[in-house]
Amino acid sequence: MGDLVKRYEAPRALKPEDVVAIYPALTDSTGTLANWRSKGIGPKWYKVGGRRVVYRPEDIEAYLFGNPILTIDSADTRPGAHVGIIQR
């Protein structure tokens, strides 16, 4: 049965339309992605073949999850670990 079940793998390169469909938490508009590219902000993107713009899923996820909000409960409390939480 293992041969009958095809494992789904995310594509390695996503068009802006794919990014909007797969990652709605990022944006709901391909226009926003275009604006971010022109301003040099947002997730990493690549130009392929001169005009085609693509994104890698790992770059989108790194952008989405790259700046977590640390709370007292989620902080690393090991001795010597500095996580940027202001001590009072």
Image (cartoon, rainbow, N blue to C red):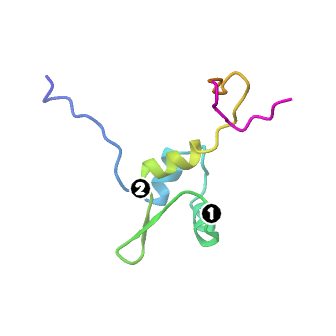
**x 63%, y 67%: residue:** 35
Residue furthest bottom in the image: 50
Does 5 sit above or below residue 44?
above
Magenta part mainly helix, strand or loop?
A: loop
User: Which picture quadrant has residue 75?
Assistant: top right
Report how far apart the C-alphas of labels 2 and 1 lie in the structure. Answer: 18 Å
Residue furthest front in the image: 80
Q: In the picture, which quadrant includes the C terminus?
A: top right
**x 81%, y 31%: residue:** 87
Residue type beneath disc 1: Ile
Residue 24, x across and y down, in percent:
57, 45
Does 9 sit above or below residue 40?
above
**x 60%, y 57%: residue:** 29
Q: Secondary structure at mark 1?
A: loop
Residue 84, x across and y down, in percent:
72, 38
Q: In the picture, which quadrant includes the N terminus?
A: top left
Magenta-highlighted residues: 79-88
* Of callouts 2 and 1, the N-terminal one: 2
The residue that label 2 is drawn on is: 14
**x 64%, y 70%: residue:** 39
Name the foreground residue: 38 vs 83.
83
Tell me if 17 is positioned left or right of 37 in this view: left
Q: Secondary structure at mark 2?
A: loop
Residue type beneath disc 2: Leu
The residue that label 1 is drawn on is: 41
Q: Contact, CB < 8 Å: mark 2 with mark 1?
A: no
**Badge 2 density bin: few <14, some 14–19, many ≥20, Cα 10 Å:** some
**Residue 83 highlighted magenta (yes or no):** yes
**Badge 1 density bin: few <14, some 14–19, many ≥20, Cα 10 Å:** few
**Residue 59 highlighted magenta (yes or no):** no
Name the foreground residue: 57 vs 85.
85
Tell me if 5 is positioned left or right of 47 in this view: left
